[in-house]
Amino acid sequence: MSKATKKEAKEKIILGIDPGTNIMGYGLILTEGKKYKLIQYGVIHLKKYETHELKLKKIFERITGIIDEFLPDMVALEAPFYGANVQSMLKLGRAQGVAMAAALARDIPITEYSPKKVKQSVTGNGNASKEQVAAMLQTLFNLTEIPKLLDSTDALAVALCHHFHEGRVQTRGRSAGWKSFIEENPDRIKK
């Protein structure tokens, strides 16, 4: 489907990404209004690459390839959660940054969501397990089976979360309220 055809039909493609340094999940959905349907989801295997630098290169190449094939209108990523291992956090942050750079290199807007927000959006429970998220997605998308690697369903959940929250103000840790809204959306204020 070409970009022109998508725009005429007001359809959008959302690419969801669950960043990882060994396995990176991705999920693509097509939306039109409140409707959504699955295009594709899967994982990028990175364990086989020996160095972190090579993994980052492969992330950039594979995400760029997915973007070039499916022409998403937006990219949604799961933000890294704070862990005890600082080195792991740095590596995960780099992986996320490279995926973001691939989208930005193609002028595709990106949005981050916390793991809790993704789980809350899909299951109604911000503390849901990966298995609960996958089971809900199986129901919502009529999947015949849940994949072994839940990184792919996590990425699909991020895309769906973005669809559910698209157009809403994301405060990302700032105090919510009218003052914040006005500062973040000056174009929406009538004078």
Image (cartoon, grey):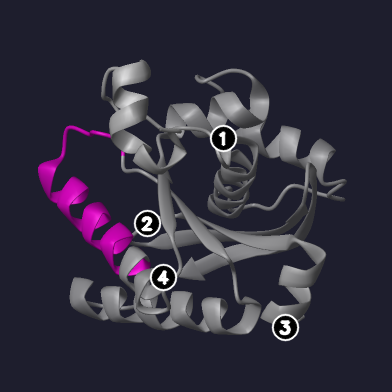
> Residue 101 occupies which quadrant of the picture?
bottom left
What is the C-alpha distance between the residues marked 2 and 4?
Answer: 16 Å
What amino acid does circle 2 point to?
A: Gly
Q: Residues within 10 Å of mark 1 (few under 14, many from 20)?
A: some
Q: Residue at x 55, y 61 (%)?
A: 26
Callout 1: helix, strand or loop?
Answer: helix
Residue 129: in sight, yes or no? no
Q: Which of 55 and 29 lies nearest the eye of the viewer?
A: 29
Look at the image and give the residue range highlighted in magenta: 81-99
- Is 105 magenta? The answer is no
Question: Which of pointers 3 and 2 indicates the residue nearer the eye?
Answer: 3
Asked if disc 1 and disc 4 are in contact, CB closer than 8 Å, the reply is no
Q: Where is residue 123 in the image (x, y as percent from the top left)?
A: 66, 25
Q: In the image, which disc is placed on residue 20?
A: 2
- Comes first in the chain, label 1 or label 2: 2
What amino acid does circle 3 point to?
A: Ser
What amino acid does circle 1 point to?
A: Lys
- Comes first in the chain, label 2 or label 4: 2
Q: Name the residue under label 1.
A: 130
Asked if disc 3 and disc 2 are in contact, CB closer than 8 Å, the reply is no
> Residue 191 occupies which quadrant of the picture?
top left
Q: In the image, which disc is placed on residue 103?
A: 4
